[in-house]
Amino acid sequence: MHPKPAKEATSVKVILEWAKEKLLGVQIESPILDARLLLGFALGTPQERFYGSEDKILTKSQTDNYAKLIERRCKREPVSRIIGTRGFWNLTLRINSSSLDPRPDSEILMEAILRSLPDKAVNLKFIDFGTGTGCLLLSALNEFPNSSGVGVDISRECIKLAKENAELNGLSRRARFIESDWGREVTDKFDIIIANPPYIQSDTISTLDPEVKNFDPHIALDGGQDGLSCYRKLAPQFVGILKKGGLVFLEIGYNQSESVSDIMEHSGLKCVHINQDLGHRDRCLVLAHRHQY
Ligand SMILES: C[S@@+](CC[C@H](N)C(=O)[O-])C[C@H]1O[C@@H](n2cnc3c(N)ncnc32)[C@H](O)[C@@H]1O
């Protein structure tokens, strides 16, 4: 049986132990870290560490509040969604039920951009298709202080959220967000295209972890029957709006590098580099106009 938090006079140490056991009981992979992060959130302290204050006594309302957060995590709601924020690259972003919870794997796109563009002083125009929280566009603009960009999403709620995140991170002067079905409302040309479209096969979504299938919006995951439908729509649009000499940084599923490269090459782009994620799986294609090579 799990220990219960005492009704009164519960210490940090006791309640963390209680939370860890509860989380372990539902096979949460990182019970200690999650227990600490959520306690930090419940107590309004930014740090997740409580070394040196294990004997601190919590009030009844702090204990009750924390127990509710742990219940949510036990139902497999991700910590980031409970807290409402996620660290991505070097920004802190708000997330909500309309947006994908940005993944560390997507930071590979940022690494690829920085590797291809060593001069951060350049003045470039970025566009980010399927911007969600705005994580990729805003991280890029934060790295390139003389550049500006547009984030596109079909979800009005995501556009609202991305604007808030731009404001929060002091980037709203250089970031514009538009509600659009991919490039339908886009008229300009761009130096850099970023995109992390939905790429999960429709019928595998139900097999994903509860954190994903029950909490990420399916419109952010669903790539159609074979997972490639968004790439097919985007490929000709990329060609139309990519400036001469420009580059596309495109996230792909771990087993999609050949099929997505074929789709892109069929439309007139060429894959000039493939970047792998921390698990050594192909994760980001770098593409350019084929006639440049
Ligand atoms: C995989 S999520 C990526 C979100 C964010 N860029 C990130 O990396 O965390 C894909 C995004 O594409 C958006 N999306 C799906 N279909 C779209 C469409 N037809 N036009 C524009 N955006 C779309 C979803 O709303 C979602 O925000």
Image (tube, rainbow, N blue to C red):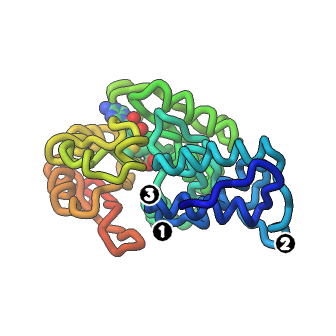
At label 2, counting other C-alpha atoms closer than 10 Å, the crowd grade (few under 14, some 14-19, many 20 or more) is few
Rounded to the nearest angstrom, the CA distance separating label 1 from label 2 is 42 Å
Evaluate if marks 1 and 3 touch, with contact meaning CB atoms under 8 Å apart.
no
Q: Nearer the viewer, mark 1 or mark 3?
A: 3
In the rendered image, residue 197, in percent from the top left (x then y), is placed at: 33, 44
Q: Secondary structure at mark 3?
A: helix
Residue at image mark 1:
115
Residue that badge 3 annotates: 106
Q: Amino acid at mark 2?
A: Gly
Q: Is residue 182 above or below residue 278?
A: above
Left or right of 99 on screen, residue 268: left
Three-letter amino acid code at the position of disc 3: Ser
Q: Amino acid at mark 1?
A: Arg
Q: Kindly identify the residue that appears in the image at 39 percent across and 28 percent down.
A: 154
Question: Label 2: which residue?
Answer: 52
Mark 3 is surrounded, within 10 Å at the Cα level, by few (under 14), some (14 to 19) or many (20 or more) other residues, namely many
SS at circle 2: loop
Measured in 3D between alpha carbons, the distance from the residue under mark 1 to the one under mark 3, in whole angstroms, is: 15 Å
Task: Write the residue at 58% across / 44% down.
Answer: 82
Picture quarter with the C terminus: bottom left
Q: Is mark 2 within 8 Å of ligand 1?
A: no
Q: Nearer the viewer, mark 3 or mark 2?
A: 2
Q: Is residue 291 visible?
A: yes
Residue 189: tell me if it is visible: no
Which residue is nearer to you in this view: 253 or 97?
Answer: 97
Mark 3 vs ligand 1: CB below 8 Å:
yes
Q: Which label sits in the foreground, 1 or 2? A: 2
